[in-house]
């Protein structure tokens, strides 16, 4: 059921105003749920509004004022969401930090944003902020949600959320109009939140987004997808990532649906089956992981079940997406697909927790077409969207019935797109950011004189007005012979295989293309155990000849696919190696959103890249790594470099 168009929530133009409107209009409906000790706890809109008021007044007693930044650190937790709402009610600006960042990374953001007050989840985050405080003397107060392990901490900067709320009660009693007055001062063009970019090419930048920018983009998609307050969302990705924040925070307050918080990252799969979300969001890496789990289970199944799965999936790939899009399909194919739905597709959707999904989005980076088609062939309405932190996420979204694997859809209402002569995508949108915090030069460099945002992505609009993204503009290059080299496209094809977790392709300005590969420890470990192949850990398994042979088969299939593309056929991988360690954010090889820091990797592993292109059969390397306890160490290995099978390029329609 849709919300009436005349409700106060549809007219509210700031986040505090939205919260008050929902508390009035749907006060008894669930706003937030959290699984604690196996039991789902529910917070209604009225309860959320009351707790936010208490926290806001408590923050006011700590000196939080309009325009100041309040750090929020932890997993998705109701009180952390309420802390963001409380900061916004005072005109302050919440700054979510990645919960898995180390103290030094947090220190940079705390300094750059001049954070005086932080709200954190638990002891782990308290410890990191206490460590970071040495370089951030302005950090005066740390408020924590979970008190476990903190009983004997006596630092005067520490305060529990319960104690903060009690301070708020006292302040409210003494100043009964303080909260309403604070909310009334908040304006749509005021900064609502600041998100730090992933920093793939340097230090992260603080992206300042206004209430208007975020709310406008959420409303545009609400109208497009007919979202209602009956949707269920599972919030399981880092709250510091703009994608998760849009889906589970901004859209929560705009549409008024229910957001569910898992008990822990380890229980997400179980909790998703509990909830059965109707509105779902996952970056490609999550979908890749789910597919790996499915394929591992199929490998462990009996022969009959494996054959049934393969036959049903072959049929699904042929007609599943057409049925989902409402196209005409033969009666026999439709009947066989219905049978497959009973035997395979329906149980599989249920196992993935996607039985109730009405709309599913993927974004964050390019998704491989094979992976995309797999989910849609199961009857899951997975669609691609395109955007960035600077654009409040929603720039392009695929419309129902117009979903294609090779585009990210047309511009969302209110968005304009043009492509520069250099092939870079430029955007105008009501959701554009206000500025980069304390970095006017970067702000000027990112915006054209006439107000277009430079996305840094290479792409073009096709004849249907849908945007096609080729790669990051800085990464798209050419081989020495002048043929196109798009590394991300190649990497996505490699990552479709369950045995490959990450890949990094090289070849710009070179005679040939080569790649590093990270194996998926769980998938390859399962494969090795079924064959009685012993191993002592990741490095040992990755170096085994049998495993390198397995990866060679995957590379061969990717090359065969590339050979059918007249534009990218020359980018077939000639040589590859399996890295001796997993690429890791703690080692600066990936961002906190798990994007490859290509330039850093090229510098760190230059000796391996040189060996690949020099035609060597092996290369010794020592690599410095950081352990979870903060210690550093080294991993040494002699890596095998393998030749790959290269196929003749066939005349075929080139992809864009």
Image (cartoon, rainbow, N blue to C red):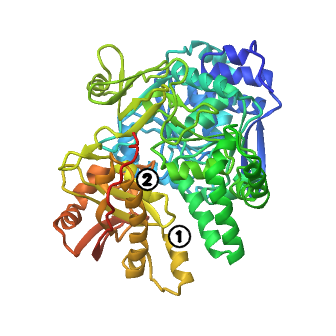
Mark 2 lies on a secondary structure that is: helix
Q: Quadrant of residue 7?
A: top right
Q: Quadrant of residue 642?
A: bottom left
Q: Earlier in the sequence, mark 1 or mark 2?
A: 2
* x, y percent for residue 37: 74, 58
Q: Is residue 133 visible?
A: no
Residue under pointer 2: 492
Q: Residue at x 68, y 60 (%)?
A: 312
Q: Is residue 413 visible?
A: yes
Q: Residue at x 64, y 33 (%)?
A: 400
**In the rendered image of this protein, does residue 195 appear above or below residue 17?**
below
Mark 1 lies on a secondary structure that is: helix
**Callout 1 environment at 10 Å: few (<14), some (14 to 19), or many (20+)?**
many
Q: Residue at x 62, y 14 (%)?
A: 181
**In the rendered image of this protein, does residue 574 appear above or below residue 652?**
below
224 left or right of 210 in image: right
Please tell me the numbered disc located at residue 523.
1
Q: Residue at x 76, y 55 (%)?
A: 336
**In the rendered image of this protein, does residue 489 appear above or below residue 94?**
below
Q: Nearer the viewer, residue 324 or 187?
A: 324
Please tell me the numbered disc located at residue 140.
none
**Callout 2 environment at 10 Å: few (<14), some (14 to 19), or many (20+)?**
many
5 left or right of 652 in image: right
């Amino acid at each position: 059921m849709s919300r009436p168009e005349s409700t106060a929530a549809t007219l509210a133009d700031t986040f505090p105003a939205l919260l008050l409107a929902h508390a009035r209009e749907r006060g008894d409906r669930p706003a937030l749920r959290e699984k604690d000790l196996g039991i789902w706890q529910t917070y209604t809109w009225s309860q959320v509004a009351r707790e936010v008021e208490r926290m806001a007044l408590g923050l006011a007693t700590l000196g939080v004022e309009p325009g100041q930044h309040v750090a929020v650190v932890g997993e998705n937790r109701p009180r952390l969401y309420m802390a963001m709402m409380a900061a916004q009610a005072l005109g302050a600006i919440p700054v979510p930090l990645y919960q898995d960042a180390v103290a030094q990374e947090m220190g940079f953001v705390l300094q750059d944003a001049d954070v005086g007050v932080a709200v954190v989840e638990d002891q782990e985050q308290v410890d990191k902020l206490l460590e970071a405080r040495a370089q951030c003397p302005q950090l005066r107060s740390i408020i924590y949600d979970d008190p476990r392990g903190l009983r004997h901490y006596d630092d005067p900067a520490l305060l529990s959320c319960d104690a903060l709320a009690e301070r708020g009660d006292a302040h409210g009693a003494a100043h009964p109009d303080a909260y309403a007055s604070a909310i009334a001062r908040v304006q749509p063009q005021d900064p609502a939140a600041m998100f730090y970019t992933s920093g793939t090419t340097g230090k992260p930048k603080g992206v300042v987004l206004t209430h208007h920018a975020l709310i406008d983009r959420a409303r545009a998609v609400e109208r497009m997808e007919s979202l209602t307050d009956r949707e269920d969302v599972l919030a399981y990705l880092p709250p510091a990532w703009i994608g998760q924040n849009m889906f589970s925070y901004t859209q929560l307050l705009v549409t008024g649906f229910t957001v569910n918080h898992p008990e822990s990252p380890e229980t997400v799969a179980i909790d998703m089956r509990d909830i059965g979300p109707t509105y779902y969001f996952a970056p490609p890496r999550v979908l890749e992981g789910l597919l790996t789990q499915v394929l591992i289970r199929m490998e462990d199944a009996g022969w009959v079940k494996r054959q049934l799965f393969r036959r049903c999936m072959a049929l699904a790939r042929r007609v599943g997406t057409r049925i989902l899009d409402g196209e005409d399909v033969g009666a026999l194919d439709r009947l066989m697909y219905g049978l497959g739905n009973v035997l395979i597709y329906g149980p599989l959707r249920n196992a993935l927790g996607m039985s109730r999904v009405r709309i599913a989005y993927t974004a964050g980076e390019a998704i491989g077409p094979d992976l995309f088609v797999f989910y849609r062939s199961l009857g899951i309405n997975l669609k691609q969207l395109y955007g960035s932190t600077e654009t409040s996420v929603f720039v392009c979204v695929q419309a129902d019935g117009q979903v294609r694997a090779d585009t990210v859809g047309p511009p969302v209402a209110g968005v304009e797109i043009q492509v520069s002569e250099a092939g870079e995508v430029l955007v105008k949108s009501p959701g554009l950011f206000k500025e980069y915090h304390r970095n006017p030069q970067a702000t000027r460099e990112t915006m054209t004189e006439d107000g277009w945002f430079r996305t840094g992505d290479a792409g073009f609009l096709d004849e249907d007005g849908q945007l096609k993204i080729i790669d990051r503009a800085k990464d798209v290059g050419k081989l020495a012979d002048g043929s196109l080299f798009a590394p991300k496209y190649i990497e996505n094809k490699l990552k479709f295989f369950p045995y490959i977790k990450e890949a990094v392709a090289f070849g710009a300005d070179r005679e040939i293309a080569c790649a590093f590969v990270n194996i998926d420890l769980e998938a390859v470990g399962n494969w090795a155990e079924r064959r009685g192949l012993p191993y002592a850990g990741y490095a040992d398994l990755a170096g085994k000849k049998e495993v390198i042979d397995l990866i060679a088969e995957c590379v061969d299939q990717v090359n065969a696919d590339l050979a059918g593309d007249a534009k990218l056929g020359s980018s077939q991988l000639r040589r590859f190696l399996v890295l001796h360690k997993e690429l890791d954010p703690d080692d600066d090889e990936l961002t906190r959103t798990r994007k490859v820091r290509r330039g850093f990797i090229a510098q760190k592993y230059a000796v391996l890249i040189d060996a690949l292109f020099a035609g060597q059969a092996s290369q010794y390397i020592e690599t410095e790594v950081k352990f979870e306890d903060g210690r550093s160490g080294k991993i040494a290995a002699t890596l095998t470099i393998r030749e790959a099978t290269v196929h003749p390029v066939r005349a075929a329609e080139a992809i864009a």
